[in-house]
Every structure is written in structure tokens, then in C-alpha cells.
Amino acid sequence: MLKQSILASSALAAIVLAAPAAAQTAPADDCDAHPENCIVFADQRIAPDIIVSSGAPQYAENIGQAVTLIDRATLDQRQTVVLADLLATTPGVTVTRNGGIGGFSAVRIRGAEGEQTLTLIDGVRVNDPSSPGGGFDFANLLSGSIDRVEILRGPNSVPWGSQAIGGVVNVITLQPSNGLQARGNAEYGSFNSVFANAGVSGKTGIVSGALTAGYLRTEGISAAASGTEPDGYRQYGATGRVQVAISDAVSLELRGYYADSRVESDGFDFNPPFLPVDDGEYAKAREAYGYAALDVRLGRLRNRVAFTIADIDRDNFDPAAGSTPIFFARGRSERYEYLGDWRASDAVRLVGGAEREDTRFTDGMVKPTRGVTSVYGEAIVSPAERLTLTGGVRYDDDSAYGGHTTWGGNAVYALPTATTFRASYAQGFKAPTLYQLYGPFGLGNPNLRPEIARSYDVGIEQKLLADRVTAGVTWFQRDTRDQIDFDLGTFTYGNILRARAQGVEFALAVRPSDRLTLSASYSFIGSKNRGPADVNFGKDLARRPRQSASASVDWKTPIGLSVGSTVLMVGDSFDDAGNFNRLDGYVVAGVRAEMPIGNKFALYGRVDNLFDANYQVVRGYGTPGRAAYGGMRVRFD
């Protein structure tokens, strides 16, 4: 079945690639006047404003770390509903989800734990302080409000602090525009699914702003692979931001994000083999994130003072046990931040900051709190033409476990032959969570140390044929020590694990014409348990496939119709640390099309899992079969 799916998927891609392509003139914009400040990828021109590397805006050519960008045009082109589905097609990233849409979703970068991925939404750290591992659940992060995503692969704790041990995902929602703009889409499809979004942005005088609203409802599939009862999902949410330019040098910005989600889930059979079974359980989550900042520019020095807040409420219900929650958690974090960005000269830039974070959570039994004070500094230096060096250090003073120092550095060198070399060394750390330190029933261990990672990577990128072909390869290795896991010997959490992940990532982007684009990636990631005293020493880490690959092709026909296809291939993995339960590899293919109606409207549709592949990414949990969706998109400029 796997070989048949691969052959069919390859044939589908070949058919689309074989279609004729005609030239098309790209619209003029600022890139035409300043091409050195733009990146061209799949005919989408992205103004470089990457902050995920240093915490301050940078051009891509000045960054020595591995960063992937996803813009709004790509989200629309792929007809993405849940962001995690698109992240799964990027180099070095694997995604697992417990069942259908709304099931717990973990994003693992370069073989790290899902809880070791730091996630930011509009400048707010949104990892949940009330969850045992302190991770972010990507299940509820829908695409409707998103304008741009940056994915940094590898540790990066100098600018971001705790949790940036595997990588960083930085999400930016709809931003203000110069003129009044509006966009929206609505679709309907399989599983009685409805997905609708609307957004508006604009500027008047010194005030600019953007607002989005969205809704998703689906009857879903059975979360339990053995089940027959569908488990539905519902979310409504909104984002907004307002900017006030008090003067040319002073501005004020407010941002907000809210999502209310409800997902039906299946409980576990407490008899062997302890797998999910149909029942009436469901969960609710309410996420509210806020950001307020004052930006003051004094000549070459930019100063930003900000306050952020993240508030997450989670409730689990079982109708068989009554109407009150069987479990609830309330997590909250508040941060005070200062960022200084001094362009001392054209060749020297200094970035530094100070932060204070206070977090707390309660589950009705414990109410722990903690405070962390941090300072950091980075130097971005260009000692020669085409060469940029970056180095930094950070110190964190945590009320729970004490002090910790982190270092990092990277370099990038571009040859006149359009060849770019990148290399980086980075440290990352993840502080013990409040649950791991002070969890109920004596599970917590207040003597825990932070998890520590050290990572090395080197890469090369080559552009050919007037930048119509871009190919890159990156080798990396990350070693993690003092990793926290539950110790069955002491029945508490302990620093008992070590892990190593190493591998290579390939990326390819081809634009044979202005109408035809092709992108592909391949990742080989070996993730091993390296704890010498651990019974699972030398075994693969759970749910880390060694190989994954994706390929996408899109063609805009001469009549305006756009057609495309994406194929995702994931290799075998194990569902458990002991490597007893194998998860077979799988291939999932999808096709899509979009037809414009005038300049403001478009009809679109897609078929996911075209060949109805039957697979699992988490043992005992189901995955959607073939599904079809259709909708309309509108945009006013």
C-alpha cells in the first residue's frame, strides 16, 4: 500500500509538472527599487523582517541560523486550516496529533520534545505554564488570523530564554496596512465542516490597526482508532492590534489574541492494551494573550518597553461523572521587557535587554508561583563585505532553581557566486515546569535542574539560473542532558535522561516560470536515548521518524485557474521509549485548485488524503481519511 501510494503521488506530481507554463510579469513593488532587501521564494516577495533569530528585525542574509518563513500567500495557496498541518511539510519538523482536528498536537523540531519548542504569538510567549511539560498545544492554532510564521530550527535561548531548546515558532497575525484592506473566506466540506474568517486593516492619521475574527466547526472523526462515534471540534476567536505613531520617533502598540475551543475526545480503556475507546469526554480551552509596548527611537538607538500577558484555562469533562470538570487547570504568565537595539555603525549592531517573568498555575490542589529575572546581550558585526558574525550571552535568575548562563553564536558568508555558507553554535535550556517542581500528590521535585542542550549546525545554500533555483543542505547535531522525565523508581520527576539528535535537512525551491513553482524538502533525523544508566539506552526516541519528505507543485494556468498538489511522506517510528510499538510510515497526498472571479473573488477547493491512506501517528488514535472541501475567498484593497 505504501509503495502504491508513492507511485500514485509521484505520477500526480509529474502530470502537474508536465503542464505548459507561460511567462507572467510580476507586479512592481519596493523590491524592484531595492532588490538587495528582498527574498524571492516561490514568486512570493517577502520584506525581510525576521525577529526569531536575535529578537530584533534582521535581513535573512545576516542570519547564520536555519530559519524557514511562511507567508500569507503560502497559507492561502495551500488552503491551510490548522497551522500544524503546514508546519509538517517544512524541513526538520514533525507533527503528531491525537485524532482529528482539535486533538492534542505536538510540533517537534529536529527530534526534540514537543514541549521543547518555544512558541510566540505576536510577541507573547504562549507555552502553557499549567501543563505538566509546559508545552504549547498547536491543536487550537488556526490559520485564519495569521500573516506570517518564522520557524527557527535548533536551540536559541540567548534572546528567548527558557523553552527554546529545540526551536522557536514565531507567529505574527494580521498587521496594519497603509490603505484600507479587507479579506475573508468561508468553506464547507467533509465531516460537516465549516471554516470562516474575516480580517480588516487600515490606517488613518497617526492610528493604524488590524482586526480578525474566525470560526471553525466540524463533526470530526473518532479520536479512538477503534471507535465509531465522531468527535467534533469547535472554535471561535479573534485578534487585534492598534498602533499609534505619537511622533516620528515614538509609537505605542497594543495587541490581543483570544480563542475559545471545545473538542470531544475519547478516554482510555484501563485494561490492556490501554488504548483509547469511545466515550463522551470533552475538553474546553480558553486562551487570551495580550501585548502592550512603547517604542522610542533616539538616533541610532531603538528602545522598546513592553508588557505581555498569557492566560490559559483548560477544563476536562466526562458526562458520566456529572456536569463539573473532572480536571481543570489555570495558567498565567506576565512579562515585563526592555529591548535596546543600537546600530553603532554600519558594521556594528548591539542588541540587549532585560526581562522579568512571573508565572503561576493552579489545578485546585496546588498553587505554585515563580519569578525569573533575565539580562542578555548580542553583538551583530560585519567585519567584511558579505560576512556577518553574531554572538551573545544570557543570564537568568530563577526563584525556583537559581541562576543559569547561556551562550550562542552564528556566522553567515555569501560568495559572489550566489553561494551562502552558514554555521551556528547554540545553547538552549528549559526550566523545570511548575508542575514538575511542585505537582500534586508528591509528584513534584523542587531540586530539579534545567534541561540543557548544545547544538551545532553548518549549511550551504546555492542559487542558480537568476535565482529561479535555490537548493540548500544543513547538517546538525544537538545533545541534551539533564532532561526531565518521570522516574518510576522514586515516583517523582527527575533529571534522568540524555538524548542526541543529529541529521541532515535538504530544501529545494524551483521557479521554472512565473506561473510554475516547485518546493521540496527531505529530513533525516536520528534521535537516540543517550542515558548510559537508562534501560532504553541507544533506542529511538518516541514518535520521531528518522525520515520525512514533502513536495509541492503549483501552476497558474493561462486562464487564471491555479492547480497544485502536496505530498507528505513520513517514515517508520516507535510510539514508546522502549521501541515495542512500531508506527508504520505513510504517504499522504492532496490536490487543490482555485479560480479567480474578477479581481476580488475566488472559488477554491481541495481533496486531502487523496488516496485514502490508513495510518496512525499516535498509537490507538485515528486519522482522517479522504476528505473534500470547497469555499470562496474575497479580498478588497
Image: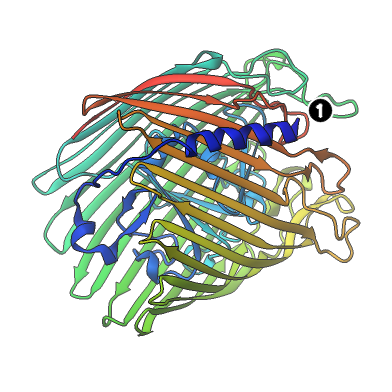
**Frontmost residue, 326 versus 511:** 511
Residue projecting furthest to the left: 205
In the rendered view, does 434 fall on the left or right side of 54? right
Q: How is the image coloured?
A: rainbow
Q: Residue 514 in the image: x percent, y percent? A: 33, 46
Residue at figure coordinates x 35%, y 55% from the top left: 40
Q: Is residue 27 above or below residue 500?
A: above
Q: Is residue 159 above or below residue 122?
A: below
Q: Residue 238 in the image: x percent, y percent? A: 36, 32
Whether residue 447 is visible: no
Q: Is residue 16 above or below residue 612?
A: below
Based on the displayed image, in which of its 4 quarters is residue 412 positioned? bottom left
**Frontmost residue, 211 versus 182:** 182
Tag count: 1
Q: Residue 549 in the image: x percent, y percent? A: 62, 47
Residue at figure coordinates x 23%, y 32% from the top left: 182
- Residue topped by disc 1: 275
Q: Residue 339 in the image: x percent, y percent? A: 35, 67
